[in-house]
């Protein structure tokens, strides 16, 4: 039903096709970009998320037949990094979104449903979380817990759920005044069932739309943290990391500003397309999820 | 109506009050109270319809919701005759009484969950009151839909596929599902077109006969309650100012407020001269009701006594009660029952 409408809408169709491409790349990563044989020969259990290295020269190598997108400084294969980085992007995006969404929905809806002083206290708590500048908070957390993708995800979850909690709280406050909630209470339905059957189905869609829009920005945030050196470890297949390898080469060589274009364009393109696809789908979701438009 | 009078009491409300605090400042200090319902006492007999009338803000809806314990009353007692035993309706006992007392809501557009199918909406009170078998529930829903003039082909549809009148029928079926004795109707037709209002009112009347229901029928429209009620209670600023049989209220109102309400009923006959009593001013704020009789600032007959002393509700030998100091001396104009029907 929903899928049919997503396909019929040209804008979301584009988003869907791009996203489908990324999903395919993520699934087929071992086929598209297998670990080179010499790495496997040395260590059959080598971590495929480690980008293979083809030398130690500090200047990037332009695209060639063996390395279609070139090599970064330190001679890491860009094509390999982007293919396996797709998996990282999905892993980070889906984990952060689903967990922070779940926390936000539970806390926000229960707080609004109970209301009164309880709601007041919970929302001030949310305010406290929201008052931290996210990047600084993330830096503090990774400093305490150490560098790593998991810690970056934890930091993002810790500071993302508040947005969803606020969003759903506002919706629940509105819906809980509706007469059908009153009618359910008059029927003797328990509070937990009212929340799950009556309130959440009528409040959750804006949150889901928000979440699908955020998928892209989560990946950008993860990339920027990796760019700052907080995220994935050295040599890990991650788009943000790929761009951070391009940091010294973005301006090109003297007299030739485009000399090292491949170091930044390919990973940048991957991030842009990923974010774009989620935003296009999120936009289309918003129209589709309106029950009044359901046939 | 005389038959209804003899009936056994089903509901006995004693001095029901609902006050809302007015809070101010950072610490929510209570600076006053809005007396939405301020000491309502009334009885409802089995099988009759009690109409509760009043203008917006007089507390009639709050009164209805308090009966259902959807709003917790501040004070007072609600006694319900549960198969011969008097039970006090409160937050604890209401759970066991949900299948006895049900409610029909005002707005059929917001009283049905837009994401639930009609059969699940109607079956919900059943599910919540111990009918665990799904087929049994849906069988009951099917017969209920027929009883309210819809069909079994409507079961799988969503509320937005129905018109206002049909939606209200769904709401009625939901209230009927658990076989209640008492139904609180909170302005069930005020959101509907006039033509549909009559259909729904007739349906409610038919269902009352068929299932032996008792209604507390809240409305702001005297012409609507006249059609369906046996007795009427007129509310003003959280209090009952007059209560009696339909004939008593319509033919011989004793309270000036009732007289004004009656004169406002539009007549379909263009030859009838309008003698509308236009009340000046607004309903006073229930947070700060006037001294004495709450109606005195708008009452054309007010005297010095009305400004200082609050009249109590007093019943005459025919069961017609009124809260007015001048009830005996005033000759108020009613309307002919039947003329406006």
Image (tube, rainbow, N blue to C red):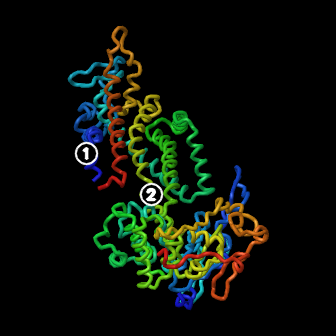
**In the depicted structure, whether residue B281 falls above or below residue A245:** below
Q: Are marks 1 and 2 in contact (CB under 8 Å)?
A: no
Image location of residue A104, percent across then percent down: 49, 50
Corner quadrant of residue A39: top left
Subunit ID for the residue under disc 2: A
The residue drawn where x is 48% and y is 47% is A164
Percent of width and height locating residue B124: 42, 71
Q: Which mark is residue A289?
A: none
Can I make out residue B187 in this image? yes
Question: Residue A145 placed where, x, y %?
Answer: 52, 39
Asked whether, in this view, residue A14 is left or right of residue B83, the answer is: left
Q: Secondary structure at mark 1?
A: helix
10 Å crowding of disc 1: few (<14), some (14-19), many (20+): some
Q: Is residue B190 left or right of residue A250?
A: right
Label drawn at residue A7: 1
In the picture of the structure, the residue carrying the numbered disc 2 is A200
Q: What separation in Å lies between label 1 and label 2 (alpha carbons)?
A: 27 Å
Q: Earlier in the sequence, mark 1 or mark 2?
A: 1
């Amino acid at each position: 039903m929903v899928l049919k409408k997503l396909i019929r809408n040209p804008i979301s169709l584009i988003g869907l096709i791009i996203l489908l491409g990324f999903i395919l790349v993520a699934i087929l990563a071992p086929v598209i970009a297998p670990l080179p044989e010499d790495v496997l020969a040395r260590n059959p259990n080598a971590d495929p998320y480690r980008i293979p290295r083809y030398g130690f020269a500090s200047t990037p190598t332009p695209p060639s037949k063996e390395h279609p997108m070139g090599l970064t400084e330190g001679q890491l294969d860009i094509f390999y990094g982007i293919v396996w980085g797709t998996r990282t992007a999905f892993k980070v995006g889906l984990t952060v979104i689903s967990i922070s969404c779940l926390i936000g929905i539970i806390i926000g809806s229960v707080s609004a449903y109970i209301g009164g002083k309880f709601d007041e206290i919970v929302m001030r708590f949310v305010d406290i979380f929201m008052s931290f500048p996210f990047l600084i908070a993330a830096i503090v957390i990774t400093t305490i817990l150490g560098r790593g993708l998991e810690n970056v995800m934890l930091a993002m979850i810790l500071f993302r759920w508040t947005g969803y909690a606020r969003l759903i709280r506002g919706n629940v406050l509105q819906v809980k005044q509706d007469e059908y909630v009153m009618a359910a209470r008059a029927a003797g339905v328990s509070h937990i069932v009212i929340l799950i059957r009556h309130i959440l189905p009528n409040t959750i869609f804006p949150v889901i739309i928000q979440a699908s829009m955020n998928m892209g920005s989560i990946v950008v945030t993860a990339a920027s943290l990796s760019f700052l050196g907080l995220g994935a470890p050295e040599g890990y297949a991650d788009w943000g990391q790929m761009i951070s390898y391009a940091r010294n080469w973005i301006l090109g060589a003297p007299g030739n500003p485009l000399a090292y274009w491949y170091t930044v364009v390919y990973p940048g393109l991957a991030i842009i397309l990923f974010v774009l696809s989620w935003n296009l789908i999120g936009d289309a979701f918003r129209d589709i999820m309106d029950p009044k438009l359901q046939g | 109506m005389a038959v209804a009078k003899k009936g056994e009491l089903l509901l006995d409300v004693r001095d029901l009050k609902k006050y809302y605090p007015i809070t101010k400042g950072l610490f929510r200090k209570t600076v006053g109270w809005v007396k939405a319902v301020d000491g309502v006492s009334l009885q409802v007999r089995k099988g009759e319809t009690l109409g509760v009338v009043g203008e917006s803000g007089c507390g009639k809806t709050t009164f209805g919701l308090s009966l259902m314990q959807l709003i917790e009353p501040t004070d007072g007692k609600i006694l319900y005759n549960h198969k011969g035993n008097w039970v006090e309706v409160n937050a604890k006992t209401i759970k066991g009484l949900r299948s006895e007392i049900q409610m029909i809501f005002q707005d059929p557009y917001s009283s049905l969950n837009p994401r639930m199918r009609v059969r699940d909406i109607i079956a919900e009170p059943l599910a919540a009151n111990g009918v665990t078998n799904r087929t049994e529930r849906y069988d009951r829903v099917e017969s209920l839909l027929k009883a309210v003039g819809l069909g079994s082909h409507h079961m799988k549809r969503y509320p937005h596929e129905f018109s206002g009148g049909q939606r209200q029928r769904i709401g009625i079926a939901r209230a009927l599902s658990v076989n209640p004795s008492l139904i609180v109707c909170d302005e069930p037709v005020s959101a509907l077109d006039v033509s549909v209002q009559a259909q729904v009112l007739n349906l409610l009347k038919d269902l009352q006969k068929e299932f032996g229901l008792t209604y507390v029928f809240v409305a702001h429209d005297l012409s609507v309650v006249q059609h369906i009620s046996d007795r009427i209670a007129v509310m003003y600023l959280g209090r009952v100012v007059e209560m009696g049989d339909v004939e008593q209220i319509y033919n011989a109102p004793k309270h000036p407020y009732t007289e004004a309400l009656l004169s406002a009923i539009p007549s379909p006959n263009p030859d009838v001269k309008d003698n509308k009593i236009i009340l000046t001013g607004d309903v006073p704020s229930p947070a700060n009701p006037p001294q004495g009789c709450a109606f005195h600032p708008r009452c054309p007959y007010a005297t010095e006594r009305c400004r200082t002393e609050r009249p109590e509700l007093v019943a005459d030998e025919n069961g017609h009660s009124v809260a007015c100091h001048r009830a005996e001396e005033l000759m108020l104009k009613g309307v002919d029952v039947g003329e406006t029907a």
